[in-house]
Image: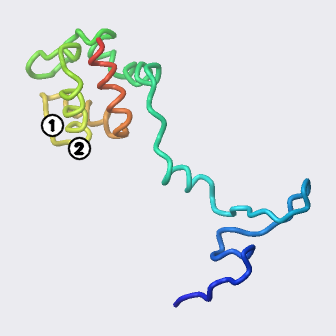
Amino acid sequence: MDTPRATDPLESKDNSQSIEKNPQTSSPSTISTESSTSQSTSTQPQAKKTKSDALALYAKCAPCHGKDGKSVAPGSVGNVLLASLHKAQVIESLKGFRARTLSKGGNSVIMYMQTKNLSDEDIEALASYIDSL
């Protein structure tokens, strides 16, 4: 069902805006009544993760992989060191663990748990950081 078009230019076309007087200028101004959180999450991209964000994320990896990425994680297959991986390899592995489609030994379940809440931005930041090791 179509709603009739407003003829007054100050009248809102939908219910997401209302007209209020600005107390400083006594002129009408349009105030949005929509939730600001829904606008910021749906229309604005998340801020790019910084190196300190990546370091904080990597702190969860260090107990098994070493602070420098040069320790083989217990129970992993292939004796792969994180520090030897390129960014694209890290991204592919982390996304595989997150999706539970990648297995690298008996302790893969640990990686499934570690990656389940990582966003694509988190994975990108971690991969950049690990690539720099």
Label 1: which residue?
Answer: 102
Crowdedness near tag 1: few (<14), some (14–19) or many (≥20) residues, C-alpha within 10 Å:
some
Looking at the image, residue 15 sits to the left or right of residue 10; the answer is left
Looking at the image, residue 37 sits to the left or right of residue 116; the answer is right
Residue displayed at 26% across by 18% down:
131
Is label 2 in a helix, a strand or a loop? helix
Corner quadrant of residue 105 = top left
Name the foreground residue: 58 vs 74: 58
Residue displayed at 30% across by 14% down:
132
Q: Position of residue 69 (x, y in %)?
A: 27, 12
Identify which amino acid the numbered label 1 is placed on: Leu
Looking at the image, residue 103 sits to the left or right of residue 23; the answer is left
Mark 1 and 2 residues: CB-CB less than 8 Å, in contact? Answer: yes
Identify which amino acid the numbered label 2 is placed on: Ala
Corner quadrant of residue 67 = top left
Q: Is residue 10 above or below residue 2?
A: above
Tell me the CA gap for discs 1 and 2.
8 Å
User: Which quarter of the rendered picture does the C terminus lie within?
Assistant: top left
Label 2: which residue?
Answer: 99
Name the foreground residue: 77 vs 33: 33
Q: Position of residue 66 (x, y in %)?
A: 29, 11
In the image as oriented, which residue stretches furthest toward the left? 78
